[in-house]
Amino acid sequence: MGAPIFLCLQFLCLAFTIIPTSAQDLGTWATLVQNAGISSMHTVVTRYNNVVLLDRTDIGASQLMLPSGTCRYDANDQSLQYDCYAHSAVLDLYSNSIRPLEILTDTWCSSGQYLPDGTLLHTGGFNDGTQKFRMFTPCDAGSYCNWVELENIQLYDGRWYATNQILPDGTIIIIGGISVNTLEFYPQRSGGAVYFPFLGQAADDQGDNLYPYVHLLPSGHLFIFDDTQAVLYDYNANVIVTTYPPLQGGPRNYPSAGSSVMLALEGDYSTAEIVICGGSQYNAYLNQTIYEPAQATCGRIVATDPNPFWEMDTMPIVRNMGDMVMLPTGEVIIINGAQAGSQGFGLATNPCLTPVLYQPDLPLGSRFTPLTPGTIPRLYHSTANLLPDGRILLAGSNTHYYYTYDGQYPTELAIEAFSPGYLAPDNANYQPQVVTAPTTVGYGQSFEVFITVPNLVGGTVAVNFVSAPFTTHSFSQGQRLVNLAITGPQPNGTTYQIGCTSPPSGNVAPPSYYMMFVVNNGVPSAANWVQLIA
C-alpha cells in the first residue's frame, strides 16, 4: 500500500501546483539575487533592513571571495585550511547587493538570537566552533560591520544543533544540542551550565530531539518540545512545571523536523497557543533509501491551559523541513521543504514548492489555503524570514556535504522573495503608511502612531510588534508576534492617529528591536523598527 499512497500524495501536491489561480491573491514570486555566492543555512533580518546570511565555514570554497588580501587560516578546518572565500554575507534589501563577511570558526548547525541592544549573539557550531560565542553588531549599508569572536569566554559545553531564546530580562538561554543535557546562559550565570534531564532524550532511536522548539510563554516559563514530547520549564527554579501529553503522528524535530510557531499574543496576554506542523515518518532517517512520505498532521495546544490537549489538523500537502513564518497579520505561512525522506545530506526528495497559508482564527478543517507555487526547491539547509516590507525571504538549500552544482538538487545560491496576497496591487488602497512613530518605548507605555491610508476599514486596524528571529533548520528561534492594545484610529488632519499601549512586561515581549506593523483590512504597512526597553 505504501507506493500507491505516496503516488497519491505526489499527485495532490502537483494538483495544487496546476490549479488555475489568481496569482495576485495567492502570492507572487521574485528573484532578488541570482547568485549570492553562499547558500544561507542561517538567516536573520536586521533593524537596518538588511539580512545576515551565514553558512558553514568548513564547506570549502564558496562563490563569494573575501575582500582583497583577506584570508582565514584555520589549522582545524576539515576542508580548506587557508580560505579566502566568504561563508557569511550581508544582503542589502534596498539594492539587493551582497557584501562578504569574515567569520573565523566553524558555524555548522549553530544558533543565534538578538540581545536587547540589537547585537546578534551567535553560539556554537562544529569542530573548533562548538564552544564559541560570536557577535555581529548590525549597521547600515554605508557603514562597515563584521563578525567578532569573543576570546575571553566560551560555552561550557559544545553546542551543535541547539536553540537560543531571549528571556524576559534580556538574557539568552541556550538549550539542547547533540549529546548535551544542560542549559547555558549569556551573560553566563555563576555555577556554569544547568543540568536538565529532559534534554538529550528522545522517544526513538533516531534521536529526534535536536534544535528543540522553544517558546517563551507569558508566564515567563519556557515551552520546550522535542521529538513528540513537551514540557513547561521554570528556568529560574530549574524545575519542570508541566509535562504535556505527547503529540501523536510521529517525530517532529531534527532529523525528522516539521516546524513550530507560537500564535499571536493578544488580549490580556494570558493565553499562548503553540502549533507544530509536519515532519518525517519515524524510520525515514534510519532507512535512508526509502524516502518515506512526510507527515501532513498539525498539532495545536493551548500551552497555558491547566488541562492542555493537542487539537489535530491536517495540512493539504505532506511536508517536512517546512518553515512556519508569522505574518504581520497574525496568520502563518508554511513554506519550503520536501514531501518525502528526512533531514540530512541527500535524504529528502520531492520538493514541495507550494506554500500554504494557515489562518488560525478559522474553524478546524478550514484553516489551510495552498498558495502560488515557486520553482526553486528549498530542501535541507534552507531558510525563510519575514522582511520589513511584508515579503518572505527565501534563501539556501544544500543537500550536499560540500557545494555541488550538478545532480538533482544542486546547491542553491539564488535568493527569492515571496509576496503574500496582501501585497497584491488590488490591496494598495488598504495599505497604511506610517507617518510618525516612536523609535523607543518602555513597558506598558502609551504612545501614538500616525498613518495615512486611502481606504480605512473601521474595526480592522491592528498594531503588531513582530520579532526578527534567527532562522535555521526549519525553526525560527525567538519568533513572536504581540498584538497591541489600541484606541482609534481617529482623523487628525490628513492623517489618522492611533493610540497604542506597549507590551506590559518582558514575559510578553522580551527587550529587543521589533518590527511594528499597522494592519488595515488584513493589509500591513511596511514596518517601523521600535526598540522595546526595560
Image (cartoon, rainbow, N blue to C red):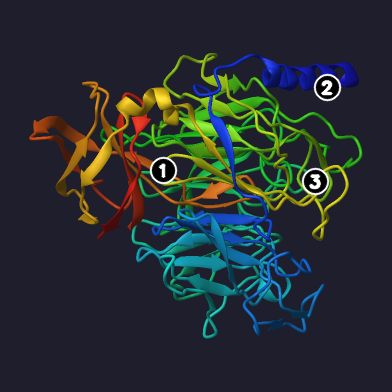
- Give the vertical position of 59 relative to 31 (above or below): below
| Element type at mark 2 | helix
Amino acid type of the residue that numbered disc 3 sits on in the rendered structure: Asp
Where residue 162 appears, as percent x and y from the top left, is: 61, 58
Amino acid type of the residue that numbered disc 1 sits on in the rendered structure: Asp
Q: Do the numbered discs 3 and 2 sit on residues whose CB atoms are within 8 Å?
A: no
Q: Do the numbered discs 2 and 1 sit on residues whose CB atoms are within 8 Å?
A: no
Location of mark 2 (residue): 6
Question: Of residues 99 and 310, which is closer to you in this image?
Answer: 99
Amino acid type of the residue that numbered disc 2 sits on in the rendered structure: Phe
Mark pair 2, 1: CA separation: 38 Å
Q: Which mark is residue 389?
A: 1
| Residue located farthest toward the right when viewing the structure as drawn | 289
Q: Mark 2 or mark 1, which is nearer to you? A: 1
Chain-order first, disc 3 or disc 2: 2
At 68% from the left and 61% from the top, the residue drawn is 37
